[in-house]
Amino acid sequence: YVSDITTKKDRVQGMGILSAATVMGYILGPILGSIFSGIKSWRVIFFLLAGASLFNTIFTFLFLKEDRSKTKKKFREEVKEDLLTSPWKDRIALLILISFVVNFGFALIYGTIPFFTTLKFNFNNAQLGYVIAILAIVGALTQVFVASHLYKQLGDRRMIVLSSLLLGVALIT
């Protein structure tokens, strides 16, 4: 959606805002989970989340309209053509596989942190929520200050290579 409503020049900024909103979810989610962890019934949390999901769904349908203009259709056709004539077209499957592995790695991190902190430090749910929130805050600050500065210095290609290498090292260690 962000790529549809932004120009090519503003796309990086638009994607950055979307990424920042996602990171805010990683920050606020564990904090709110920590606050609500004292509630005895899981049903209360379930209904709170169901209400938030319903609100988001209604908001999306009411306020986020799809742009079906001829300009956007032309843009989509250009992107499709660029993709098919790109020197990367033979490597698209590899890029998709790498993306899957990276996302799977992050899922494993958030799946193993509870076990690690519980076994190693005997953390309860509230403490665990704060640990995950702190990790998300550090990630957000790194994105905003370090990554944006490096992007200006290195450009697209070098930034992709550097961030891929750093991510690989981080996931391995």
Image (cartoon, helix red, strand yellow):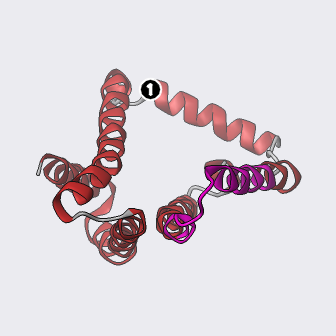
Q: Nearer the viewer, residue 93 or 31?
A: 31
Magenta stretch containing residue 36, yes or no? yes
Is 57 colored magenta in this rendering? Answer: no
Q: Residue furthest right?
A: 62
Q: Could you say which quadrant of the image residue 89 lies in?
A: top left
Number of callouts in the render?
1
Q: Give percent across and percent down for residue 45.
A: 65, 55
Up-down relation of residue 124 to residue 88 (above or below): below
The majority secondary structure of the magenta stretch comes to helix
Q: Counting other residues with Cα less than 10 Å from the Cα at mark 1, is it few (<14), some (14-19), or many (20 or more)?
A: few
Residue at point 26%, 57% (across, down): 118
Name the residue located 47 percent from the left edge and 62 percent from the top edge: 26
- Residue 44 picture quarter: bottom right
* Secondary structure of the residue carrying numbered label 1: helix
Please state the horizontal and vertical placement of residue 122, each as a whole percent of the image: 24, 63
Which residue is at a point 59% across and 63% down the rendered structure image? 39
Residue at the extreme front: 40
Kind of residue at disc 1: Thr
- How far across and down, in percent of the image, does residue 149 sit? 32, 75
Q: Which residues are magenta?
A: 32-56
Identify which residue, 135 or 142, lies in the foreground: 135
**Which residue corresponds to the image point at 30% horizontal and 42% vertical from the top-left?**
108
Front residue of this view, candidates 78 and 12? 12
Residue 23 place in picture, x, y as percent: 48, 64
* Residue wearing tag 1: 85
